């Protein structure tokens, strides 16, 4: 039997019969949906409360729209989660826009959020937000492109860390400031999958660097494999202290978007150092 979202709200009927939702509002709610951990779609979640304030709506109406988007999400459907299909017809076109061009959708909705918050520096967590001041010596399309990349990379980090509940998939480290959203297929190698959460793994900086350099990979059956090129260092106590990885150690899988097996195979074929 399909599982439904459950969250506290006073009157679904009243919320759904409230003022009309325009496309921009729905896009902003979808922006929140893709960044929010699955278990946080309810009215007491700070992010839901903030969105309600930004939109001038109740938290229950925002939570309902989040559940409507769950009805459009094929990954949720595959898990037997039906969401709230009553509003699917209104939300499906917005979902389709997002999937047809994730980069543009996320960038544009982040700027809309920033405008509502009155400052661009709030498009993501403090300290991570791109600022136009960072690009004062760059002109025209190059400047716009760099800002867009910074914004989208910050959102990708939010999505991946939320997916892994702020824990390194290898070590279990749970200090958000020390976690990286590592791309399986690098950002520059595949535009279409840049913002796909299944193309990301939450790792600590050391593992992220080793993964990027091909010194370790994660197999399609979700196990860590070290490059043979590290064999000369494995007798060192420091090696075991810093890496601390057992042969074929399984990673901790997220609740929502596990790493795509084809992407992991790509990393093994193109980046992993086999000799």
Image (spheres, helix red, strand yellow):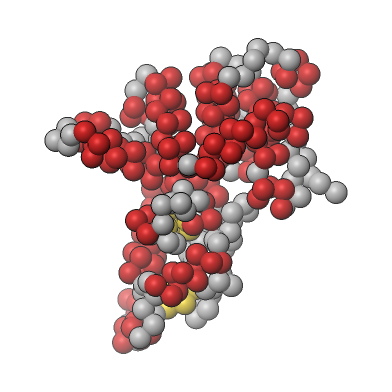
Question: Residue at left 33%, top 69%?
Answer: 213
Query: Residue 269 placed where, x, y %?
Result: 43, 75
Q: Which of 201 and 191 is in front in this view?
A: 191
Query: Residue 101 placed where, x, y %?
Result: 48, 42
Q: Which of 2 and 179 is in front in this view?
A: 2
Question: Residue at left 46%, top 69%?
Answer: 266
Give the side of residue 267 with respect to residue 38, left or right: left
From what the image shows, is residue 244 above or below residue 63?
A: below
Residue 205 found in image quarter: bottom left
Give the side of residue 212 with respect to residue 64, left or right: left
Q: Would residue 209 be visible to someone looking at this image?
A: yes
Residue 58 found in image quarter: top right
Question: Residue at left 21%, top 33%?
Answer: 140
Q: Which of 8 and 263 is in front in this view?
A: 263
Q: Which residue lies furthest to the top in this view?
A: 19
Query: Residue 262 placed where, x, y %?
Result: 54, 67
From what the image shows, is residue 159 above or below residue 106?
A: below
Question: Residue at left 34%, top 27%?
Answer: 120
From what the image shows, is residue 243 above or below residue 146?
A: below
């Amino acid at each position: 039997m399909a599982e439904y979202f459950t969250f506290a709200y006073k009157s679904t009927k009243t919320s759904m019969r409230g003022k009309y939702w325009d496309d921009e509002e729905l896009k902003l709610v979808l922006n929140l949906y893709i960044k929010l951990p699955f278990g946080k779609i309810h009215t007491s979640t700070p992010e839901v409360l903030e969105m309600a304030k930004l939109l001038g709506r109740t938290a229950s109406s925002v939570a309902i729209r989040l559940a409507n988007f769950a009805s459009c999400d094929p990954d949720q459907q595959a898990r037997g989660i039906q969401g709230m299909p009553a509003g699917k017809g209104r939300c499906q076109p917005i979902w389709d826009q997002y999937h047809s061009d994730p980069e543009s959708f996320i960038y544009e909705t982040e700027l809309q959020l920033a405008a509502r918050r009155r400052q661009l520096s709030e498009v993501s967590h403090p300290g991570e937000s791109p600022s136009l001041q960072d690009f004062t010596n760059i002109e025209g399309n190059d400047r716009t492109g760099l800002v867009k990349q910074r914004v989208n990379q910050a959102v990708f980090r939010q999505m991946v860390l939320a997916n892994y509940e702020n824990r390194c998939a290898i070590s279990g480290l749970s200090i958000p400031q020390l976690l990286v959203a590592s791309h399986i297929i690098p950002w520059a190698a595949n535009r279409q999958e840049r913002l796909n959460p299944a193309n990301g793994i939450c790792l600590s900086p050391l593992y992220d660097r080793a993964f990027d350099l091909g010194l370790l990979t994660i197999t399609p059956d979700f196990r860590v494999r070290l490059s043979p090129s590290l064999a000369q260092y494995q007798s060192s106590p420091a090696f075991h202290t810093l890496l601390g990885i057992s042969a074929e150690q399984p990673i901790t899988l997220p609740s929502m978007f596990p790493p795509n097996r084809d992407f992991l195979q790509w990393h093994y074929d193109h980046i992993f150092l086999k000799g």
